[in-house]
Structures are given as C-alpha cells and as structure tokens.
Image (cartoon, rainbow, N blue to C red):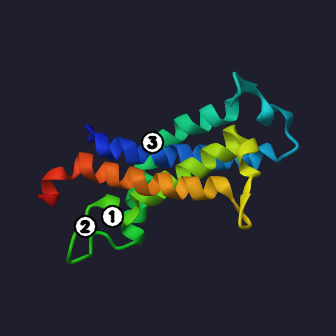
C-alpha cells in the first residue's frame, strides 16, 4: 500500500507521540531495563516507535471515525481537523523524553516549552497547508 507523503508525516507524528508518552510513563517505573539508553536515546522508545509506526495509520483512521469525518457534509482536509494537534503533541512528548531540563523555565506559571510547542505547531500547520494543499487554496 503506497501512502502519500502527507499521510506519512501524520503517521510519524502520531508514532512519535505514542512512543514518547509510553516511554515517559514507563520511565517512572521500577524496572531497570526501561531506563537503558544508547546515545541518550531510550531503547524502549525505539522499540515502541517501530511498533507505533505500524499502528499509526489505524490510530489516525480511528480518530477520523471518532470525529465523524466521513459523515461531514463539508469534507475538510485532515490537517484542518488535527494536524496541528499532532505537531503539538509530538513536540511536547519529545521534549518530555529527550530534554527534560527544558521543562523547568516558567512563563506566568506555565512551562515555557508549552508556549514554544504551541507556536511551532501553528507555524508547522501553516507550512503543511502551503506545501500539501496549495492547489486547494487557489
């Protein structure tokens, strides 16, 4: 099955989010083998990421069914429904796993990395729209 590059980007974002969040949850456990890493990349993250790539397309399709994407009268592209959230969640979860020290600075009571992740997700969504949906906008 040949997937378009935009679908691959969505699936990679979902896989990164799943792998990072599971790594973060299991890193807090008492199992010593969960904390093994090679070049500061957790081994558990790599294994879960490979599994997550396989199920990411199913997860994406599940969310399309959950938000009644197929039943909508006006079929907006999937980026309008959730690509910004995929970018936002992938950034937050990657920071939580790979750069825990960036979660400390505060900006008005909110961790600063959340603000940067939100701004980046907005910009990435606009770039994504311009690259993959240029003909739809003209």
Which dot marks residue 76?
A: 2
The image quarter in which residue 42 lies? top right
Q: Split into 4 quadrants, where in the image is the N terminus?
A: top left
The image quarter in which residue 47 lies? top right
The image quarter in which residue 33 lies? top right
Q: Residue at x 86, y 34 (%)?
A: 32
Q: Measure how far apart labels 2 and 3 are at the Cα level.
A: 21 Å
| Contact check, label 3 and label 1, Cβ < 8 Å | no
Q: Residue at x 33, y 58 (%)?
A: 79
Q: Which residue is mark 3?
A: 12
Is 50 placed left or right of 111 in the picture?
left
Is 110 placed left or right of 78 in the picture?
right
Question: Percent x, y for residue 50?
Answer: 53, 34
Q: Name the front one of labels 3 and 1.
A: 1
Q: Secondary structure at mark 1?
A: helix
Label located before the other in sequence (3 or 1): 3
Q: Residue at x 37, y 54 (%)?
A: 125
Question: Percent x, y for residue 31?
Answer: 85, 39
Q: Measure how far apart labels 1 and 2 are at the Cα level.
A: 6 Å
Q: Which residue is mark 1?
A: 80
């Amino acid at each position: 099955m040949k997937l378009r590059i935009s679908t691959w980007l969505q699936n990679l974002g979902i896989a990164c989010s799943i792998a990072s969040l599971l790594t973060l949850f299991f890193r807090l456990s008492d199992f010593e083998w969960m904390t093994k890493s090679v070049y500061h990349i957790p081994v558990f993250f790599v294994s879960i990421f490979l599994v997550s790539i396989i199920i990411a397309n199913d997860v994406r399709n599940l969310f399309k069914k959950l938000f009644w994407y197929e039943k909508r009268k006006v079929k907006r592209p999937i980026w309008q429904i959730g690509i910004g959230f995929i970018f936002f969640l992938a950034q937050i979860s990657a920071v939580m796993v790979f750069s825990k020290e960036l979660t400390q600075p505060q900006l008005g009571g909110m961790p600063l990395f959340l603000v940067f992740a939100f701004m980046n997700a907005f910009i990435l969504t606009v770039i994504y729209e311009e690259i993959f949906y240029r003909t739809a906008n003209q």
